[in-house]
Amino acid sequence: MEKVLNFFHIRERKSTLKTELLAGVTTFLAMAYIIPVNVEMLGESGAGIPDGGIFFATIMASVIAAVIMGMIANYPVALAPGMGINAFFTYTVVFGYGLSWQAALAAVLISGVLFLILTLSGLRRMIINAIPQSLKYAVGAGIGFFITFIGLKNAGIVVANPATLVGLGNLAHPTVLLGIFGLILVVVLYSMGNRFSLIIAILTTAIVGLVLGWLGVGYMPAYVAPDSAMNVWTGVRETFGQAFIAIPELFQAPQAIFIIFTFLFVDFFDTAGTLIAVGNRAGLINEEGELVDGNKALMADSVGTIAGGILGTSTVTSYIESSTGIEQGGRTGLTALTVAGLFLLSLFMFPFISIFSRVYIEEGVYYSPVTSMALVMVGALMVTQLKDIDWKDKAIVIPSFLTIVFMIFTFSIAEGIAIGFIFYPIVMVATKRRKEVHPIMYGLFVFFVIYFILNAVVV
């Protein structure tokens, strides 16, 4: 016990063993949805990867990355295949460009190797540290709004609307009502000062949903046995190592460089944004505004992506849902290690995990009601970083505002960061303060402009 406390510096970070374990459970419950969603997105009904293979790869890539994050970086941040980039994998690379899923995995593998090179060279850390502190706060607050939107969408409270893009969902739908119940419960518990409000709300909502389901109410959480067609070990044999074999196919495609670039870009800045956001909340940003042991933390997603490409899944990235565990009190790598252990257990406990992470689809609307309230609650807490932005400096206000709104309106953390970082040097030059801009920020300006040009012209 004492060795564990000392290894993770639990006392120094003013935490306890119990708090770290509970934070890990909370984070895992908030992000476990990635298991069924990734199987659906990349599996036989999506990109075509064998269901068993993608199920195994999703879990093991998450485990490998989280162990590195916990044991080496000592960060309370969990990782898994990223949402959004898995859609790019399926709908753009496989369906749009007509590449095989094996070739798409080859692109993931190569981008992971490039991530690792950039990390070991220290360039990734230098870039993050060159970002002005106020812009870092804007990234954190923007992610707060972003995950709030995800939570409301998962609960079915906010849905697509052809006339206005988004609108209020069907509040009479039983799954939406369950999500609303969870949201009210977590707000009440948090307002009462309950330290375990998130995990209590998640468990209570799951139990209420199970009871309602047993009473005959439709679209409720349920204990669901794995699909009999999901033969995990057969899938692993069909998936493992296919990325290496498909490298020649990848480079026969004219879009190969763009595909690799996109995987690299999204993971680079999604992870950077997440670490900045959760680092502020967890006290892992030093007085100079730099991530403590930043290179070690950044290495986790690089290795995770390489492992994911080899095993058979899309790019691995740091999960903003880690903020749920941080709000629960997680401050050390033991939180991430707990998540890794629970992911590993889920290899044998998928039916039980489905109670918390099951996604329901009806008329194009996705419902994941049990953990949606955690995202909304954490989003509300993260937007408090707005108070630390220098609102009197118009050179900061404009790019900060654009960073936040574009994260929400493009439904992309990375693209929100890109827009903000393009406008920052523009405003600084316009206000005759160009010498105050770090040279790396000018480099990022060029980088992002090229990214959007490529994104617009490559078909």
Image (cartoon, rainbow, N blue to C red):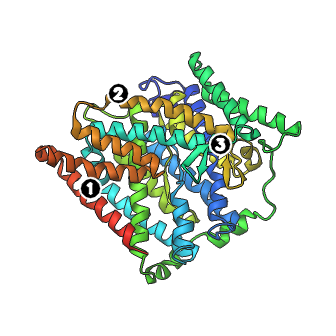
Disc with the residue nearer the chain's start (2 vs 3): 3
Q: Is residue 194 above or below residue 24?
A: above
Label 1 vs 3, first from the N-terminus: 3
- Marks 1/3: CA–CA distance: 39 Å
In front: label 2 or label 1: 2
> Which residue in the protein does label 3 denote?
169
Towards the viewer: 25 or 32: 32
Near mark 3 (Cα within 10 A), the count class, few <14, some 14-19 or many ≥20, is: some
- From what the image shows, is residue 81 above or below residue 110? above
Name the element at disc 1: helix
Q: Is residue 433 left or right of residue 57?
A: left
As drawn, the residue found furthest toward the front would be 163
**Residue 250, horizontal then vertical, whole percent:** 47, 78
Q: Which residue is mark 2?
A: 387
Residue beneath the point at 38% across and 31% down: 385
Name the residue type under label 1: Leu
Image quadrant in which you'd find residue 384: top left
- For the residues labelled 2 and 3, say whether their Cβ atoms are less than 8 Å apart: no
